[in-house]
Amino acid sequence: MAIYRQDLSRAYSRTARFRSVTPLVRVPFLEERWKCQLYVKCDQFQEIGAFKIRGAANFALQLSDEERKKGLVTHSSGNHAQAVAFMAKQLGVKAFIVMPDNSNRVKIGNAEKWGAEISLCAPTIEARLAAAERLAETTGGRIIPPFDHPWIVAGQATCAMEVFSEWNDVDVLVAPLGGGGLLAGSALAAKHFSNRTKIIGAEPEQAQDGYLGFTSGVREERVTANTVADGLRTTVGVTPFQIIKDEVQDVWLAPEDRIVPWMYTMWKETKLLMEPSSAVPFAAMEEHQEKLRGKKVVVIITGGNVDLAHLPVFST
Amino acid sequence: MAIYRQDLSRAYSRTARFRSVTPLVRVPFLEERWKCQLYVKCDQFQEIGAFKIRGAANFALQLSDEERKKGLVTHSSGNHAQAVAFMAKQLGVKAFIVMPDNSNRVKIGNAEKWGAEISLCAPTIEARLAAAERLAETTGGRIIPPFDHPWIVAGQATCAMEVFSEWNDVDVLVAPLGGGGLLAGSALAAKHFSNRTKIIGAEPEQAQDGYLGFTSGVREERVTANTVADGLRTTVGVTPFQIIKDEVQDVWLAPEDRIVPWMYTMWKETKLLMEPSSAVPFAAMEEHQEKLRGKKVVVIITGGNVDLAHLPVFST
């Protein structure tokens, strides 16, 4: 299922009421450090604290009334669960969400806050899928996938589209790479709405399936993720992978032990809260800083849902 | 020394190059909670991470070249030290700063970052004043007071002036009350640039000299401050007190044990980092929420210089 320019344009107008157009904020200390112009796109300011609302909204809004009435179903340990719960609340329907029983309390609490019905399952992908399938069967609700679907990719594209509509002159846009929905969407947005922006994915060294697949040209499924960046532990999906392979300029790795220090450095210097996954681009960019020199750079901050009661140990 | 409308206007243009016009950000969860319209004025986004640059800039820029060349002197345990250090760097002169030897490492480090010469002294106000006087004598530099001076008050007024130039329809503006520079400046800004905004001060219960003085009409100097809000431990200055007494609508107290929980609630809900002093208005507003109902409200976020290595214990 190809994703056309018009799929992106329609996602942009379709989702307008449910996403915020988040600000681009200049970061002087990074401009000085890397000798470039640098802005961050603050998607942690979405009402659910993360960009995931974009794809979930674009998906849920394309269901028929009939389908939608039966409820929205998904499985997720994180921000996608919140996005689906939020959309269900907005649409006045039920959300049924499977979460692994080792998910953090904050993320479970957030999904409950929007009124979702949570079922816990064993923390394996098989258990999650099986539980979601069962839920979908018993409720008749549609499963909203977290990233591996053209509607989700087109929804996530609205983030970079907002960037380009505000700043049409971006040389490099960096986004974290987990399941690949945001990175693939950003690449399509650049292809259709900016003919000069290079798209870079940033991935934790300890979850480098995307990097390996991008390098070899073959999607890699056998990587065990072991990273503090809890939003980026998933394997890149089939649909995003095809797009990333063709449209993304490069994938950069973040040294695992630099992710948490970069998170706190960004908090300290910008006063913007971000979660570990959102620090991954900065840790990766530090390793590739010579490629940023003199460039106009945007980094997408994907979310700010940190568990403040269990913060990782401070170090810089 | 009276402060006229033209002192504010001139402070506004004089300081323009050194302050950022910080954003007003809407806070939906508080709007729902208190049934009002509510924006925060994000002065933690100033380059020094706090509003204090406004007053320090307005003071330093009114010195003669002769005076200025000898350096800027001050005593401070916190954000004012950074503001003076930053201004000295901008003006290409030296900064000599006395800091109590129990100041937190982050605040000392920040002042050093801008190139200031730091002298540590015993943590009493007498030791601080004596050390600053000595420094001023030996260097010939001018002491920049942290709050008790008309030039400082006029400089701090630029914060509310920015608010009114963006939103001319504010019913209530709430600012923390420590030394009183910001609150007095905000009151003068409202008097001259908005004829309908009521100004409210928010003070920690454990540093309530401002509240007692406002209530009795006589400045109160005998209160021992014992609050987590380290920016608000000072006694209200003579110049600010006169203005606050006449021009401020009310002073509200924040229960001490609600300050830290409110800080984390604000982090969690808004993804904006703020220091304990900046959480004081929210803890106070919760106690007076019936007065906010239906109103258009702005709260000044004064700073975001938290010590991430020594965060207060999380609780909500």
Image: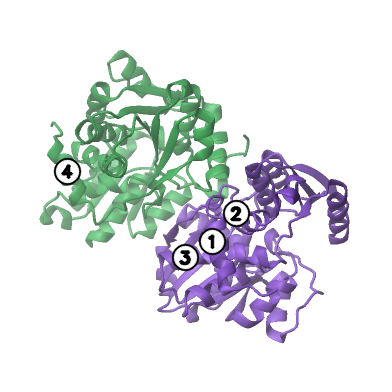
Chain colours: A purple, B green
Q: Residues within 10 Å of mark 3 (few under 14, many from 20)?
A: many
Label 4 belongs to which residue?
B9
Label 2 belongs to which residue?
A50
Chain letter belonging to callout 3: A
Chain-order first, disc 2 or disc 3: 2
Q: Nearer the viewer, mark 3 or mark 4?
A: 3
The location of residue A39, given as percent across then percent down, is 44, 65
Alpha carbon distance from label 2 to label 3: 16 Å
Secondary structure of the residue carrying tag 3 is helix
Q: Residue at x 32, y 56 (%)?
A: B116
Alpha carbon distance from label 2 to label 4: 40 Å
Chain letter belonging to callout 4: B
* Tag 1 near tag 2, CB within 8 Å: no
Q: Quadrant of the C terminus of chain B?
A: top right
Q: Nearer the viewer, mark 1 or mark 4?
A: 1
Chain-order first, disc 3 or disc 1: 1
Secondary structure of the residue carrying tag 4 is helix
Apparent side of residue A173 relative to residue A151 in the rendered image (left or right): left
Chain letter belonging to callout 1: A
Label 3 belongs to which residue?
A163
Residue B311 visible (yes or no): no
Q: Same chain, marks 1 and 2?
A: yes
Q: Nearer the viewer, mark 2 or mark 4?
A: 2
Chain-order first, disc 1 or disc 2: 1
* Tag 2 near tag 3, CB within 8 Å: no
In this rendering, the answer to whether A83 lies above or below A146 is above
Residue A12 badge: 1
Determine the residue located farthest toward the bottom in the rendered image: A216
Apparent side of residue A278 relative to residue B77 in the rendered image (left or right): right
